[in-house]
Amino acid sequence: METLSTSHAHGGVQGVYRHASLATGTDMTFSVFVPPHAEGARLPVVWYLSGLTCTHANVTEKGEYRRACAELGLIFVAPDTSPRGEGVADDPQGAYDFGLGAGFYVDATQPPFAAHYRMWTYVTEELPALLGAHFPADPSRQSIMGHSMGGHGALTIGLTFPDRFKAVSAFAPIVAPGRVPWGQKALAGYLGDDRDAWRRHDAVALIEDGARMPDMLVDQGDADPFLEEQLQTHWLEEACLAAGQKATIRMQPGYDHSYYFISTFMEEHVRWHAHRLKGL
Amino acid sequence: METLSTSHAHGGVQGVYRHASLATGTDMTFSVFVPPHAEGARLPVVWYLSGLTCTHANVTEKGEYRRACAELGLIFVAPDTSPRGEGVADDPQGAYDFGLGAGFYVDATQPPFAAHYRMWTYVTEELPALLGAHFPADPSRQSIMGHSMGGHGALTIGLTFPDRFKAVSAFAPIVAPGRVPWGQKALAGYLGDDRDAWRRHDAVALIEDGARMPDMLVDQGDADPFLEEQLQTHWLEEACLAAGQKATIRMQPGYDHSYYFISTFMEEHVRWHAHRLKGL
């Protein structure tokens, strides 16, 4: 693992790191904020999965999570959204919503994407192991959040590993990729026609199929230009209600899809996670 | 004035605007955050001047000022750092520290820069008038802060208009441009050999020459790679001490020159400004 940069921030250290990933067969870059802590302490970890077109950098620069994470003693980890580099297939038309920057947190089975697009394994297995080896992370206290495509990732991973993630939250998530254009394009492209595989990567379908998580917090702006066609938050509300899945899903008046929205509610999400990770 | 974007943030509105500037003879872009407020209220204004290579966008995205400004009811304004566009002269070698992105908050007298580089007039006259006309700003309650080259701008403007700016603060400012490479290049390029003109744009020289401001807060990281050659904060400390200028100048251990440093101390600066603007 190579350190690309470290900066003091809010009494802790914001770092950016790179390593050769076995899962993706590429170099992968990610950021970690480590709050001020006692020597030898192991700290709870909040995972943040980013949205379409993003890298680790967007939330690292614009997410406004450090102040609360420093106060509450939480590590904050932000992976990239896809493999990158020479030989990594991209959308044939170079679209923003498939290929580079748009891995959708699945292990692709379809050529030419199956070679490198293994973001599920990367985020749920390889990067957690690396984190445990190089940072003062406590694997028994983890939570996960994400934005848009990364909200989809956080919800599906949280539903798949309910014992691992004590809290799951999302900003403007894609809640049912199998039923909206962004998700249909991605799931077909990465997973082919296997609709059972699609359902394992669709939060609403997972809940319908019996998956549960301890608790869920979702914020969605009602001025989000993607709400009606791509996000359709009401499907998640309906699925949670029908299944008895505990959830707080809030429509925030006037807010859009940007980091101005995310950073407004980030502190509240971090505190909600801390409460479930640390009993705070 | 044209609205380029607005987003809800922390209960207020973060906007980006463009207008045809008479001072610079170019279009100029700037950002304004307006906190939640009562209809008809006039609000105190914090000006933020950015550093070399920056536009309005850096602090707008990375500055982490909105939460505190929303709580305290402060407007936050971030201008660009130079004129831009067709016909605007740049550094002959395209260097980062002169020309585009490096206006140094002076009115240039030297060709070819005198044509457009009128950032002093732009920031101290034209943009305040525009702000008063289009936003709920209270001109009787203004303060100013800045980073690096923008810290130089904030200090020199604050020292020149002590009745207008009730608080002046800076992150890692250039305190004596006439005595360091960045500043010598810029002042010679924009103002020529007129050393009296240089002194009017040099915070340490202004203090030596009798200028004063009500109070000053400066934070400087001791891991800042520019500290020794370009910033030399101790000159400001010595000048304030010799002149009896009230000042709090703090060396922050481990911090560098980045927005990770700025965003760490931004809230404290905003509160310090609010105290002087509103008696909070």
Image (cartoon, coloured by chain):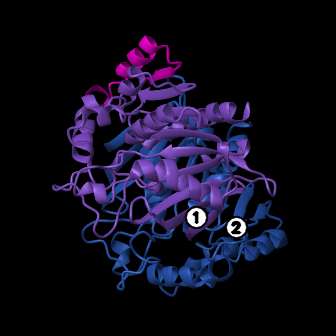
Chain colours: A blue, B purple
Magenta segment range? B227-253
- Position above or below: B232 against A185: above
Residue at x-position 27% and y-position 53%: B99
Q: In which quarter of the image is the N terminus of chain A?
A: top left
Return the chain for callout 2.
Answer: A
| SS at circle 2 | strand
> What's the residue at 51%, 88% (across, down)?
A193
Amino acid type, label 2 = Gly
Please provide percent x and percent y for residue A99: 40, 75
Among numbered discs 2 and 1, the one appearing first in the sequence: 2
Q: Do the residues labelled 2 and 1 touch (CB within 8 Å)?
A: no
Q: Is mark 1 on a helix, strand or loop?
A: loop
Mark 1 falls within which chain? A
Q: Distance between the residues labelled 2 and 1?
A: 10 Å
Quickly name the residue at label 1. A258
Q: Residues within 10 Å of mark 2 (few under 14, many from 20)?
A: many
Residue A7 is one of the magenta-drawn residues: no
The reply to whether residue B124 is visible in this rendering is yes
Tag 1: amino acid: Ser
Q: Mark 2 points at which residue?
A: A221
Q: Which residue is drawn at the image coordinates 35% and 81% (left, top)?
A: A111
In the depicted structure, whether residue A128 falls above or below residue A201: above
Look at the image and tell me whether residue A79 can be seen: no
Pick whichever, A83 or B196, lies toward us: B196
**Height in image: A142 above or below B6?**
above
- Which residue is situated farthest in the left direction here? B93
Specify the quadrant of the image occupied by residue B227. Answer: top left
- In reply to whether residue B233 is colored magenta, the answer given is yes
Note whether B79 is above or below B65 in the view shown.
below
> Residue B70: x percent and y percent?
70, 48
Residue at left 35%, top 20%? Answer: B235
